[in-house]
Amino acid sequence: MWYVIRTKRYKEQLVKQTTSSFAEDVYLPLLRTKKRCLGKLVEVTEPLFPCYLFSRLRLNEGHYRLVHTPGVSGIVCAGGEPCVVDASIVQDIRSRETNGIIVLNPRTLRPPQRVTITYGAFRGIEAVFERYLSGAERVAVLMDSIGRGNLRVILRTDAIVPQTAS
């Protein structure tokens, strides 16, 4: 069965390598993204789910070794019982890989497309997409403000979703 293993920060690769010796399968989905480093935007490969990876093992046989593996914080549980992950979920994530890297389909928004903010202090507020900033990592949106016209807000791209036609 598949389980989600919680790791210490930046220890995902170490845990993957170590648990591979006793688990049937270990899966660490990776994502290529851009981050700012010393003022420059650089491309990095990092875990899709920081501090988590998937492991398929017989828990009754590998539990002790797993929880005592360097870098492991524990197994994701609900009510004290380890959560089993359906194999189709792991397969679905794997199916999005190209050359071992998860490929996310970029959303292409066009001005003046209506969007909804899904994260942060403005969550739930409708706005109008204005433009992408610094590649496709940040966006500028316009919100109606009472008596002041439009208010420009800068957000991460993943903090908005396009509105669906009603």
Image (cartoon, helix red, strand yellow):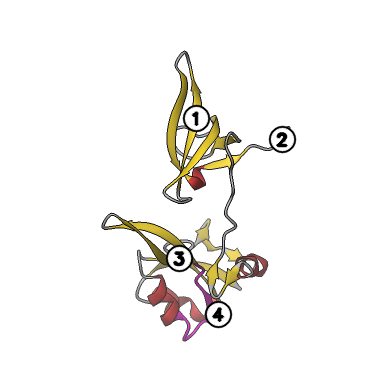
Q: Which residue is mark 3?
A: 47
Q: Position of residue 161 (x, y in %)?
A: 58, 42
Please say whether residue 25 is one of the residues in the magenta stretch.
yes
Residue 12 versus residue 164: which sits nearer the camera? Answer: 164
The amino acid type, in three-letter code, at marker 4 is Asp
Q: Which residue is mark 1?
A: 142
Q: Which mark is residue 74?
A: none
Mark 3 / mark 4, whichever is N-terminal: 4
The amino acid type, in three-letter code, at marker 1 is Leu
Q: Residues within 10 Å of mark 3 (few under 14, many from 20)?
A: some
Q: Residues within 10 Å of mark 4 (few under 14, many from 20)?
A: some
Q: Which residue is mark 4?
A: 25
Residue 23 versus residue 102: which sits nearer the camera? Answer: 102
In this rendering, the answer to whether 15 lies above or below 118 is: below
C-alpha separation, residue under disc 2 versus residue under disc 1: 19 Å
Mark 4 / mark 1, whichever is N-terminal: 4
Q: Residues within 10 Å of mark 1 (few under 14, many from 20)?
A: many
Please say whether residue 85 is one of the residues in the magenta stretch.
no
Mark 2 touches mark 1? (CB < 8 Å): no
Mark 3 / mark 2, whichever is N-terminal: 3
Of the two numbered discs 4 and 1 in the rendering, the one whose residue sits closer to the viewer: 1
